[in-house]
Amino acid sequence: MQQIDASASIDLQVMWHRLIAIVEEQAQVLIRTAFSPIVRECADLSAGVFDTSGNMLAQAITGAPGHVNTMAESVRHFMRRYPLQTMQPGDVFITNDPWKGTGHLNDFVVVTPCFRNGRAVALFCCTSHVMDIGGLGFGPDGSDVYMEGLHIPMLKLFERGQVNETLMAMICGNTRQEVETEGDTYALAACNDVGATRLLEMMEEFEIDDLEALSSHVLSRSREAMISEISKLPKGTWKNSMTVDGYDTPIVLSATLTISDEGIHVDYSGSSAQSPRGINVAINYTAAYTMFGLACAIGGRIPNNSGSLSMFTITAPEGSVLNALKPAPVSTRHVIGQMLPDVVFGCLRQVVPDRVPAEGASSVWLITMRGETADGRSGRYGFTVGFTSNGGTGARSGKDGLSATAFPTSLSGTPVEIAETQTPLLFWRKELREGSGGAGKTRGGLGQVLEIESACNKPFQVLASFDRISFAARGHEGADDGSAGFIGLKSGQKLKGKGAQEVEAGERLILMTPGGGGRGNPRSRAQEDVARDVRDGLISIEVARSVYGAR
């Protein structure tokens, strides 16, 4: 009997690993079939498989945490609108509802049920960013969600294998990038189909008719592992707050973190009220990035699924910037939402200081640009591109921060060659920003400098949604802050960190992404590390001498 139990346990573990491989293939299919560079080149997506109760069993390694952890709740919203027993083979569901999806209209969420022998055995879900969904465009200027683009309630994209032509016509009729948006929508449905095919192959191989035993194994083991890690922490309550730029006035993010036998709870009471502009965060996105920060610090080796996430609870006052209520504008919710791991780390720094870094650039610098093409026949917004660039992460215990690295999102930087091929833009510079990492015993990661110009002698717009310009990433334990970000023109004019602004023909847009904060007294930094930084062009000789005390 013991031998049978051991064999069954091995089978369950093998199938668990297969699930992870299946959803990673699902994500790779999305990357290879998507039309938009932000998906193909930067992997702004998520993919996962769910049991018939709506529990996330596995997520793809490739993808953004904000997408992954909001996706974990999205499936349950779909199941409430379309109960499992009403779903049919060939059905595919879609929404971009910010409060039931991933927090803003520019992300499509697609769910596909998987059937075996006429019975639903699982659901596959995926998300990806769509660059243009109408409205004002992907920027923070809207005063309500209706100004930000087309809203798709939970609808059937396919019904029994037949595409909803009316819905597709509505989607294509409300975007400045019809081909890309239509292609991305079909890519989302296609990757779910591949996931379902691979799952059925696995079930056939292991001769199982449902995932109930596997689901129980995955969720219970993950939950137990997280409980074990939390039990090693001291019990109590800790607070932290952080001030960020906001749209036109600063925003305060306040967190109270409580560790108890029931798990970890984070409450954001004391945070600023919701903004009149599109930097607000729906509670699902607030929870997603808070949970990601907690998981990184507490259970970084534990698989991310509904079992491990169940030990975290998140609350924020209704009507606050972190729990904005419909119809609040939420287009660039990432600018505030991606700051939340740093806020949580500030609480955990008082509990497990060696596990968390100093503050970093945090929110990705997604440079959305649009304008006329050389022929001028495509109208004022003939092209729209989202160019992903990143600042530096905070210094770690015993290690420097990472330069030009996306955290807490995991997006890759957009290759210059891709942007120049698909738009009439010319990138004169893309290089590390010397001296931008906060000095310390361990140094903050560096930001970067970008210099961009229209190559067709026509103006273009930048839909700015950048932060850490007025409030830089803070250093800790006697270290220096990272350098603040900057946006302006080469002629000397400074631009606003948020809002649509014109770059005239012949002008060059200059962006300097923020650096990460340092950690520890700079005079304690190893001399060989200082010398290497000078040799690599990361700091100047003057800084090495005056700040680090180099001889």
Image (cartoon, rainbow, N blue to C red):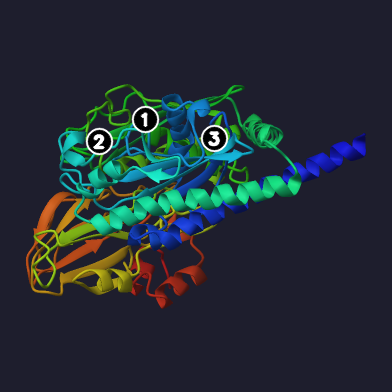
In the picture, the disc for residue 251 is 2
Kind of residue at badge 1: Ile
- Residue linked to disc 3: 351
Q: Is residue 396 above or below residue 525?
A: above
The local crowd at label 2, few if under 14, some if 14 to 19, many if 20 or more residues have their Cα within 10 Å, is some
Q: Position of residue 489 (x, y in %)?
A: 13, 64
As measured in the structure, the alpha-carbon distance from the residue carrying label 2 to the one carrying label 1 is 17 Å
Q: Residue at x 23, y 62 (%)?
A: 511
Screen quadrant of the N terminus: top right
Which tag, 2 or 1, sits closer to the chain's start? 2
Q: Position of residue 282 (x, y in %)?
A: 33, 32
Q: Is residue 246 visible?
A: yes
- Residue linked to disc 1: 283
Front-lying residue, 374 or 488: 374
Screen quadrant of the C terminus: bottom left
Closer to the camera: disc 2 or disc 1? Answer: 1
Q: Secondary structure at mark 3?
A: loop
Q: Is residue 349 visible?
A: no
In the picture, the disc for residue 129 is none
